[in-house]
Image (spheres, rainbow, N blue to C red):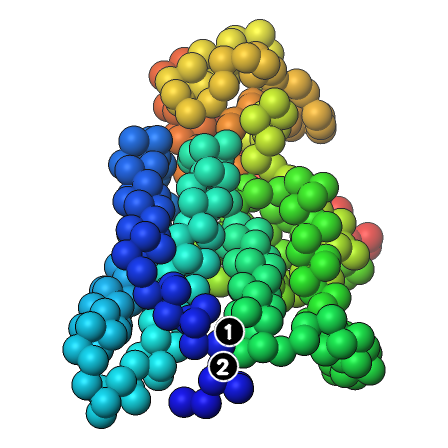
Amino acid sequence: MNDRFINLQNLYSLLEIEPFVLLCSLVLLCWIFYKVFLREANQERHLKLKAHFNRLIRHFLILSALFTTAVLLKRSGGESLSRALPYVALFCLLWGMIVFVKTCGLIILQYLFLGSMKHGVPVLIVNIFSLILSIILALWCAAAIFNIQVAPLLATSAALSVILGLALQDTLGNLFAGISLQVDKAFEIGDWLEVTSGIQKCTGQVKEITWRATVLSGWTSDELITLPNRFLANAQIANFSLSQTPILRGAMFRLPMTIDIRLAKQCLLESIKEVRTVRAWPEPVVLITETSESWIVFKLYYYIDNFGSQTTIGDHVYDAAIRYLRANNISLAGSRMEVIHSPTPA
């Protein structure tokens, strides 16, 4: 390989044992960090981190094989083998940069996990960090290995940047919208959101935040909703997963007018104590919301923490309330229709 196009001296200096040992130490540090500090992460996040580690290990094994081959070729001294050494060294450099970027990205991902142990962090932040680190390494490689003047190249690429910016306008818009949403911390992975834009409304739990879109999981496990980040940035978002704000829900009961109102309220309040998923504070309350000639409508207000379980919790509330009412000889009021018959005039 011609030394005019590639700096073989700088390339071969990277084939020493010290850079390889440092990279091995970085991978080992990443694994120790995972084993020591991330024991409390949930099962789903453990599986994702394990998938990241599996990909990292595969790339590290390829790097180890290339590094071993390059060292053997360098020490062999044969003319035919020495011709293959620059190509093996280039592949070794490429895989070394891949392992370095993935390891650093995984360390950043694990560090961010410490602040969100339950649900984890969006991949968007790690991808942006990996992209910036990859660009820096690519520019360094171009200058140190391929003898390319980086400064004039960056100056002459302004027109190309404008063309790419116009062509990727939507993609870049979604990217920066996703970054702004993460900076504002309007929501995080695991939160239940209600997104409203005009007449469009959807509800789901945040599963992932990518370059282009945010993925929500609907009420059923097989329902995935993909919303572009620009759409989310311009929509009205209601977050139902904030720990300091419990969720208010209600259950309505239509009872006969002849019942004892105090006894009915007492039965409803006592029944909801059996539902453990209902918060004891703020306390549940029963209010009369409607009356008619034949019935009274009571509404039982209660607070919950898990927005995704509101349907199941509501079923338990109705079941316990109806059992308590029946135990106290209180039945639900049925619909009644009166037919008044007027005699036909003679």
User: Disc 2 vs disc 1: Cβ atoms closer than 8 Å?
Assistant: yes
> Which label is found at residue 6?
2
Task: Please tell me in which quadrant of the rendered image residue 114 appears.
Answer: top left
Q: What residue type is labelled 2?
A: Ile
Mark 2 to mark 1 CA distance (whole Å): 6 Å
Nearer the N terminus, badge 2 or badge 1? 2
Residue 107 lies, in percent from the top left, at 43, 45
Residue under the image location 32 percent in, 52 percent down = 18
Residue under the image location 34 percent in, 49 percent down = 22
Question: SS at mark 2?
Answer: loop
Between residue 241 and residue 163, name the one nearer to us: 163
Check the image and report above or below for 126 versus 60: above
**In the displayed structure, does residue 215 sit left or right of residue 148?**
left
Residue 57 lies, in percent from the top left, at 26, 59
Which quadrant, please, contains the C terminus?
Answer: bottom right
Between residue 96 and residue 71, name the one nearer to us: 71
**In the displayed structure, does residue 58 sit left or right of residue 5?**
left
Q: Which amino acid does label 1 sit on?
A: Ile
Circle 1 Cα neighbour tier, 10 Å, few/some/many (<14 / 14–19 / ≥20): some
Residue 31 visible: yes
> Which label is found at residue 173?
none
